[in-house]
Amino acid sequence: MTYRISRRNLVKGAAAAGLAMPFINLRTAAAQDGPITIGIVTPLSGPVQLIGNFVRQGAEIGVAHINANGGINGRQLALEFRDSKANPNDASVAARELIGSGVNLQLGTISSAVALAMGPLLESEGGVVLTSGAGTEKLNHENYNAHVFRVGDSPVSRNAGLVRHIVQSRPEIRKWGGIIPDHEYGRTTWKIFDAAMRKIVPELTGEEAQIADPILVPYGSGDYRNYITQAMRLDVEGIYTSVYGGDAVTLYQQAKPFGLFDKIDVLLDSANEFLVATAMKDQTPAHWSGFHWYYEANKGNPLSDELYAQYVERTGNKYPMGWAAEAHAGIMAYAGAIAKAGSTETGDVIAALKGLEFDSATGKRRIRAEDNQAVKNAELAFIEPSASAPDGFAVTDYVSLDGEKVIEPATPGQPLDTTIL
Amino acid sequence: MVDIGLTVFNGLAWGMATFLVAAGLTLIFGILHILNFAHGGFFMIGAYVAYSVMLAFGGTMPLWLYLVAAIAAGIAVGGMGWGVDKLILRRLRHVEDAYSLIATYALLLVCVGAVQLVWGLNYLSVMPPPALNSVVFLGDMFMPTYTIFIIACGILAFIGLEIFISHTEMGRLIRVVAADPWMAKLLGLNVRRIYLVTVVFSFALAGLAGGLLMANQSLSPELGGIFLLQAFGVVIVGGMGSIRGAFIAAILLGMIESFGTYFVPQYPGIFFLVALAVILLIKPEGIMGKEQTA
C-alpha cells in the first residue's frame, strides 16, 4: 500500500507547522525562564503531620529567601506539595506522579522507611530527593543510592556528638542505661551510643564505661510502667533514650512519679528537641536533647535569624523544631547545586550536589561526594524546668559541635562499622 | 518479691486503664451488635474536653475538680453519642456488619480531624492533681497514687456497671432488648429509646474514661488509636458484649503483658497479642461466651 501526499495537504501541513512553531518555542523558553519547581513529599496528614508542617514552613521560608534575592540564575523557585503520609507506598505514588509532571527535584522525606524506598524509585524514574531528617544509618551505608542525599545529621554525628559532649562535661558518670524504642531506628541509635560510649569514655577518662543492656519499649503504647520499673532496677547514673514524640511524653509523664529522674544524674534524649518540654512545661525532667537546629546556638547567622523570625511570625510558635531547618537546608542545597550546574537536569544536579558546600541555618554544610551525607554541626541543648520562665521550662546550656569531628568515615554500600567511630 | 508485687501492680494498672476504655465498647456491642471503631475517637475527645475544663480553671486542679472535669467530659461525649445515634447508628441497625465497620471507622477519622482543628497537632501533657501526685510505699514497694487511682476507677466502674445492668429498671430493660428486641417491641417497650439510652451511656463512659485517664499519657490526635486495639482485645477475649468478661479479660491480659515483659524483656508489647491469639484458639467465643452477654 502506498500513500500519496497531495500538494494541497502538504501546504496545509506546512502552514500548520509554521503556525505552531512559535508556540513550541515559547513553551520551551517559558520552561527555561519560568520558575523551577521543587516537589515536597512530606506527611501533610496522619500521625506525623506535626513534623510535615515544620518541613512545609522551612521549605517555604527557604524559597522566599532565594526568590527575594533574585532566584537562581534569574529564575524563581516554586514548591509543589504532596502528602506522603509517612508511608512508603503513598510517598512512592506522589514522587512518581511529580516526576511524571516534570518535577524531578524533590525533598521533604522524614521517615526512614520512605527514604529507603525512594532510592530505587528515583533512580528508575530519573529524580533526586534530599531527606529532611530521615534517621536511618542505612541511607549512607548499605542502602546508599546516588539519587538520595541527606543534607541533615547522620545518626552517628548526632549520637556520637551527644556522647562526646556528655563525657567531656560529666566525666564522672560512667554507668549508663538506655530506654530504646523497639524498631530499627531505636536499635541503630543504641548501637551508636553504646559504641561511642565504650570508645570515648576510656579515651577521655582512662576508665571503662559500664553500660547495662537497653530496655526495649514498644512503639505507640499508652503504658510504659513495666519498662519504667525495669529502669528503676538498673544501677546506672545516666539514661540515654531515643523514644520520640508522644511516646516520649507518655514515658516521661509516667516515669516522674516513680522517681526515675531523681535516681539518675543525667537524662540524654537523642532527638525530642522541644517536643517534650512544650508538652510537659514545668514538669519537664531536666535533660540534654539533640537538635537538628537550635536557633540560639546560631544567633548571628543571618539565615538562622531569618528562619527563626519568619517561622515565629508565620506560626506564633516560639519553639520551631529542627525539621524546619533541614527542609530549609534542602532548598539552600538545591539552590547551590542548580546555580553550580546551570541546569535542573537530574544528572547535572546530582553531580553538583556531590561535594557541594552551602550556607544553612546551622552554618556551612558540606555534602560528601562519596556517600551523599552532609557534614554539619551537631547541636544539643540542656532543657530544665524553670518556675520563672513563662512556659515553665528554659534552655540553660547549649553547644554546637564541629561536624567534621563527630561524623563517621564515608563507607557507602557497607554496613555501619561502629568500631571505626 | 518486690519485683513480683510491682509486676502485679503494673498489670492491674494496664488492665484497669484498658477496661475503662473497653466498658463502653462492650456495652454498645452487647446491645446494638455494632463494633464501634469510633469509640477510641470519643475517648480521645473526652480527654481533650477534660483538658479544656482544666485549663479554664487555671491549669492545676485539686482532685475534686479533676473528677468534675472527667464527669463533664463524660456528659459532653454522652451528648455527642445522642447526635451520633440520631444521625448514624440508627441507620446502621439493619445493614450488614461491614457497613457499620466502615461507618464507625469514618467517624473515628472525623474525631481525629475535629481534635486537630480544635486542639491542634501539638503533644499535650497533664500531670495528676497534687493529691494523686505522690507515692505510697508498701514495704519496699512503691506505688504512684495516680496509678492506684486508675486501678480504683476501673474496679468502681465495673461494680457500677454490674449494679446498673443487673439491679436497675433500665438495666433490666437493656438486657431484655439485648436478648430479643423483636419480642421486647411486641411487649410494648420503646426499643428505639432504649437503644438511644445505651448509646448515650456508652459514649459517656468513653468520655469519662478519657477524662479520668487524661493524666495517664500524652494527649495528641493519635490517642484514639492507642487504646483502641487493647480495648478491642479485651472485649473479644472477654466475650463480645460481656462487661464481666471484659473486666476479667482486662486483668488477665494485663497480667500476661506485665509478666511477659518482666520475664522476657527482649520482646516488648508482644505478649498481649500472643495471649489474644492463644485464648481465641482455645476459646473462640471468649471467656464469658455468648450466653452471658450483658
Image: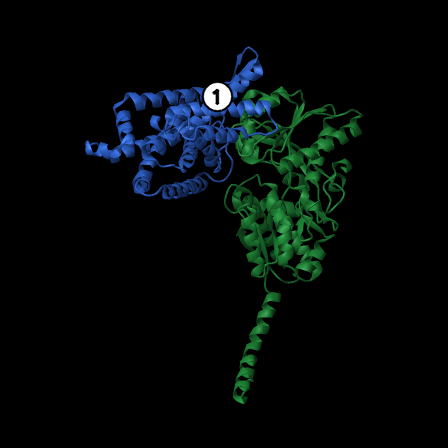
Chain colours: A green, B blue
Residue A28, picture quadrant: bottom right
The image position of residue A101, as x and y in percent, is 56, 61
Mark 1 — residue?
B12
- The residue sitting at 44% across, 40% down in the picture is B112
Query: Is residue A300 in sight in this rendering?
Result: no
The image position of residue A114, as x and y in percent, is 59, 47
**Of the pair B186 and B156, the residue shown nearer to us:** B186
Q: Is residue B85 left or right of residue B231?
A: left
Query: Is residue A85 in sight in this rendering?
Result: yes
- The residue sitting at 49% across, 27% down in the picture is B216
Residue A240, picture quadrant: top right
Q: In this view, does A28 lie to the left or right of B150?
A: right
Crowding at dot 1, Cα within 10 Å, few <14 / some 14-19 / many 20+, comes out as many
Judge whether A327 appears above or below B258 on screen: below
Q: Mark 1 falls on what kind of element? A: helix
Chain that bears disc 1: B
